[in-house]
Image (spheres, rainbow, N blue to C red):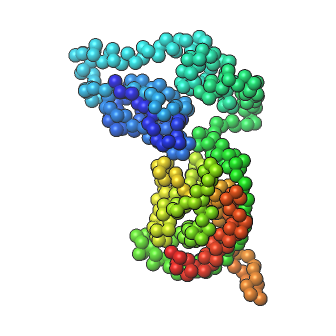
Amino acid sequence: MADIIVPELAESITEGEISQWVKKVGDRVEKGEFIVELETDKVNAEIISEEAGILTEILAQEGDVVAVGSVIARVEAGEAAAPAEAPAAKEEAPAAPAPKVEAPKAAPAPVAVEETTSNERVIASPAARKLAREKGIDLAAVSPVDPQGRVRVQDVAAHGTAQVAAAPAATPKAAAKAVDESRVDAVKMTRRQQTAARKLLEVSQGTAMLTTFNEIDMTNVMALRSRKKEAFMENHDGTKLGFMSFFTKAVTAALKKYPAVNAKIVGEEIHYNKFFDVGVAVSTPDGLVVPNVRDTDRKNFAEIEASIAELAVKARNKKLALSDLEGGSFTITNGGVFGSLMSTPIINGDQAAILGMHNIVKRPIAVGDEVQIRPMMYVALSYDHRIINGKESVGFLKMVKDLIENPEDLLLEA
């Protein structure tokens, strides 16, 4: 008998939500085969079986939150024959597999009876049911935070230690019941959406965030890109020359000159990062993710473009690893691809600043004593004023502007 256990994915991840079982009870599984997808705060992880055999029991259903180290399924290991041989083996030794298959099912049977009698019709995760049994708490008395009424382990833990909050906690449940389904579609937020919402709120409440703006004349960089893009693709195995590599190199040069923008607050200390890992926001059907392009100070334009393209594909295919998402020192987000003219981006995680790029729009501007039509882009730098002062933020953004408007200088910085 082999237990399928939620593996330790990273120090910051303590639990996840069962997203999808790709195998069902009775299915044959091979050693190392992917059997269940786990959605965490950061990435979707594929959990494999460490043994070959038959999946005899599933202990956590899709949508359940499971802690790292918990058992979510069991596989009957051994020298079981391939599925094609199973009928022939039935007559020879039916007694051997029977006890093994039934043994794991016998254990939860009394629990199921207990739950249906004392906690009838209560929707709860296995972890919540276990904790309720240990504490002798009736799940029907627990007020869940989940708008759809699912009781989670956090709700059980809070019950009895936060009696004052019990009455308000019932409000979301009551509100959920009062929803007019003919007028509203109530859709549960994914785990990643919940995490993003919580972290965005934490950033907005936990930082002294300000935003400064500037505008960039894109004429020269667009002309350079137009002249060089075909030769660039030929020389770099089809890698396209986009604007992101120019902005990434400009940001990296500015981070070197203004180290406070590349810093973060840790306790009562400011940590000035000596590395340059620039996060690039990527939109996916499941929301925004920010994988990091590592060591941008050591990469050339082609290497940066190739890294961004690879990370974007991995993000859209849900193949990002935790190592792709952790440890960034600065972030760039490009709302311009969706047509945004101007915005105030929110700082990512514990970083000190984020650069927002926007749509390129032809506008009349003064060039010397003349008015000309130029392709212009508004850029925004949102920053934590606890670390970065106004002079540094304005200087940083102006340096990015100057380098993009004079791409030959940017090549020298590279």
Q: Residue furthest bottom?
A: 369
Picture residue at 46% right of the left edge, 75% below the top: 232
Indicate the position of residue 341 as horizontal and vertical percent values. Answer: 71, 65
Q: Tell how many labels.
A: 0
Question: Is residue 361 at least partly visible in the picture?
Answer: no
Q: Residue furthest left?
A: 92
Work out whether 90 lies above or below 399.
above
Give the quadrant of residue 187: top right
In which quadrant will I find the N terminus? top left
Picture residue at 67% right of the left edge, 20% below the top: 160
Indicate the position of residue 200 as horizontal and vertical percent values. Answer: 67, 48
Question: Is residue 288 at least partly visible in the picture?
Answer: yes
Give the quadrant of residue 33: top left
Q: Nearer the viewer, residue 121 or 400?
A: 400
Indicate the position of residue 413 as horizontal and vertical percent values. Answer: 53, 76
Indicate the position of residue 378 as horizontal and vertical percent values. Answer: 70, 69
Q: Is residue 215 left or right of residue 10?
A: right
Picture residue at 39% right of the left edge, 27% below the top: 3
Work out whether 111 lies above or below 80.
above
Q: Is residue 2 left or right of residue 287?
A: left
Q: Nearer the viewer, residue 2 or 262?
A: 262
Work out whether 69 lies above or below 394.
above
Q: Nearer the viewer, residue 240 or 357?
A: 357
Picture residue at 61% right of the left edge, 12% below the top: 118
